[in-house]
Image (tube, grey):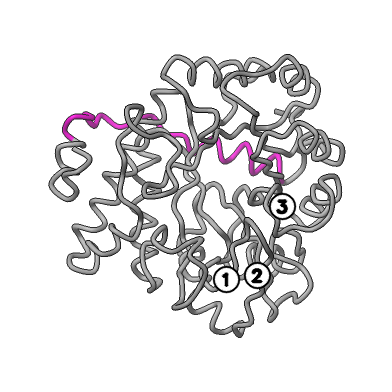
């Protein structure tokens, strides 16, 4: 791990090109991420995952994916069932707290069954954002609800379900994306709420789940904290809010650097993210020239970042003895469409 660089990278297609193989071998990203463009059939996914790890000589390297349910789900039938969005779990929770939490655990445990089948070991879940009325639909039904308590309870259940199945969770988007009135894939939103409102509402789920191993930042400006920089590149937000106020000392990765919310070229973005205090730079779209730009300013994983990375891997538990058929049958009592 000491030779790894502080970055997580994607790839362009369903198999690695010679150029990508040589690049990964030379630059040695700490981990990889898959998107829908990388997903074909069972053996192809397994081969791609194995090839990624072989490039960097680390059979334990994490491979991430966004497998939430609802519209953000990279594995689809027949590779994995279509699962409900977080908002559907929240609706169940509002009627019956215990049932909602159980369903959230079951669904995450099923994600773990699905992902490990292909060698994928980390899921960018739970979504801990708490939307307000009128906010951008980029979060929308992905959120468990509009009240922090629902998000806290269901987020905890989802994280535990993943870890029970041997998959690592990544809570997102710290310190909170729920007030953003713009889609960060296309532009940079500014949130003007007071610090006290943010602490009470937006930060609460992250504070309650600050013991989780990994988190992903929000490309959002919080004017009450740092009016010039989004959380991802704000040393003030990362140090004073994420590390101190929220109390998160786990592995912190940026959201995708290929999103339009961040300004500057890719070397500039990578340098700014690391200088602000993120442990890892995430780049997702697989565009080779952009990855090369990220790598040109990304340093080796060392110091506290290396300690956090090592600690995150210790959260990988031995899988519980749950039987997949039994878990699916129980989940079907809540959502029979994915039995």
Say if mark 3 contacts mark 1, CB within 8 Å.
Answer: no
- Please indicate whether residue 94 sits to the left or right of residue 20 in the image: left
Q: In this view, does 93 lie above or below 215?
A: below
What's the CA distance linking mark 2 and mark 1? 6 Å
Relative to 89, does residue 305 appear above or below in the rendering?
above
Residue 331 included in the magenta stretch of the image: no
The numbered mark, 3 or 2, whose residue comes first in the sequence reads: 2
The quarter in which the N terminus is drawn is top right
How dense is the environment of label 3, judged by Cα within 10 Å: few (below 14), some, or many (20 and up)?
A: many
Residue found at x 26% / y 56%: 101
10 Å crowding of disc 2: few (<14), some (14-19), many (20+): many
What residue would you read off at disc 3? 278
Residue 170 vertical placement versus 86 (above, below): above
Callout 2 touching callout 1 (CB < 8 Å): yes
Identify residue for label 1: 180
Q: Position of residue 107 (x, y in %)?
A: 29, 44
**Where residue 248 sits: x, y (%)?**
58, 58
Query: Marks 3 and 1, Cα distance to the nearest angstrom?
Result: 21 Å
């Amino acid at each position: 791990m000491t030779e790894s660089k502080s970055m997580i990278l994607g790839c362009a297609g369903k198999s690695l090109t010679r150029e990508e193989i040589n690049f990964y071998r030379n630059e040695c990203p700490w981990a990889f991420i898959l998107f829908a463009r990388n997903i074909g059939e069972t053996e192809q996914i397994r081969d791609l995952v194995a090839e990624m790890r072989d490039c960097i000589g680390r059979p334990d390297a994490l491979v991430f994916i966004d497998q939430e349910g609802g519209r953000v789900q990279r594995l689809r039938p027949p590779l994995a069932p279509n699962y409900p969005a977080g908002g559907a779990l929240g609706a169940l929770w509002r009627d019956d707290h215990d049932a909602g939490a159980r369903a959230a655990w079951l669904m995450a445990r099923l994600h773990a069954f699905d992902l490990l089948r292909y060698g994928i070991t980390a899921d960018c879940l739970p979504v801990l954002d708490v939307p307000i009325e009128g906010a951008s639909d980029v979060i929308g039904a992905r959120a468990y609800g509009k009240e922090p308590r629902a998000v806290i309870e269901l987020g905890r259940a989802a994280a535990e379900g993943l870890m029970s199945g041997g998959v690592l969770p990544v809570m997102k988007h710290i310190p909170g994306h729920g007030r953003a009135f713009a889609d960060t894939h296309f532009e940079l939103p500014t949130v003007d709420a007071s610090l006290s409102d943010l602490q009470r509402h937006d930060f609460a789920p992250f504070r309650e789940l600050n013991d989780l191993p990994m988190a992903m930042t929000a490309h959002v400006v919080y004017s009450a904290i740092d009016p010039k920089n989004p959380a991802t590149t704000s040393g003030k937000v990362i140090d004073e809010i994420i590390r101190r106020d929220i109390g998160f000392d786990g592995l912190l990765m940026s959201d995708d650097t290929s999103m339009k919310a961040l300004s500057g070229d890719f070397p500039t973005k990578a340098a700014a993210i690391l200088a602000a205090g993120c442990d890892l730079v995430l780049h997702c779209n697989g565009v080779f020239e952009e990855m090369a730009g990220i790598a040109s300013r990304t340093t080796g994983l060392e110091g506290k970042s290396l300690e956090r990375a090592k600690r995150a891997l210790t959260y990988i538990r031995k899988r519980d003895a749950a039987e997949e058929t039994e878990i699916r049958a129980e989940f079907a009592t809540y959502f029979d469409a994915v039995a």
